[in-house]
Amino acid sequence: MDKPSRREHELALAVASALAPSEIQIERDKDKLFDPRVATEIVDVAYQQALNYFVGKYPD
């Protein structure tokens, strides 16, 4: 994968920030003993997926 531009990084971060809260809430509803590391993983996966989508499409 190419190195993301600043714009691509910011777009991926925005998408991950928008999607992660609902995914985290779904996981919290499943398990009473929610592990905060799961939230970090959810944000990371969402960011990586969005970044894969944006890389090469929005150069600085």
Image (cartoon, rainbow, N blue to C red):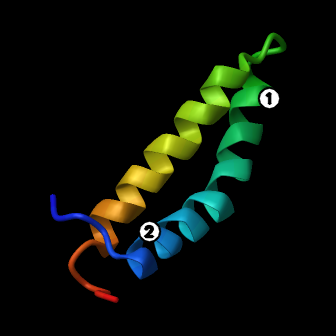
Q: Is residue 59 left or right of residue 21?
A: left
Which residue sits at x=40%, y=63%?
50
Q: Is residue 11 left or right of residue 32?
A: left
Q: Residue 15, image x and y in percent?
A: 55, 67
Secondary structure beneath disc 1?
Answer: helix
From what the image shows, is residue 59 above or below residue 45?
below
Q: Is residue 30 left or right of residue 46?
A: right
Would you name the residue on which mark 2 appears?
9
Label 1 packing within 10 angstroms: few (<14), some (14-19), many (20+): few
Q: Is residue 6 left or right of residue 3?
A: right
Residue 36 position by quadrant: top right
Q: Residue 16, image x and y in percent?
A: 57, 58
Cα separation, mark 2 vs mark 1, equals 30 Å
From what the image shows, is residue 38 above or below residue 26?
above
Residue 29 position by quadrant: top right
Label 1 amino acid?
Answer: Asp
Q: Earlier in the sequence, mark 2 or mark 1?
A: 2
Q: Quadrant of the C terminus?
A: bottom left
Front residue of 52/33: it is 52
Q: Residue 49, image x and y in percent?
A: 37, 55
Q: Residue 59, image x and y in percent?
A: 28, 87
Mark 2 vs mark 1, foreground winner is 2
Tag on residue 4?
none
Residue 23 position by quadrant: top right
From what the image shows, is residue 13 above or below residue 28?
below
Tag on residue 29?
1
Which residue sits at x=61%, y=34%?
40
Label 2 amino acid?
Answer: His
Most distant residue in the left direction: 1
Q: Quadrant of the N terminus?
A: bottom left
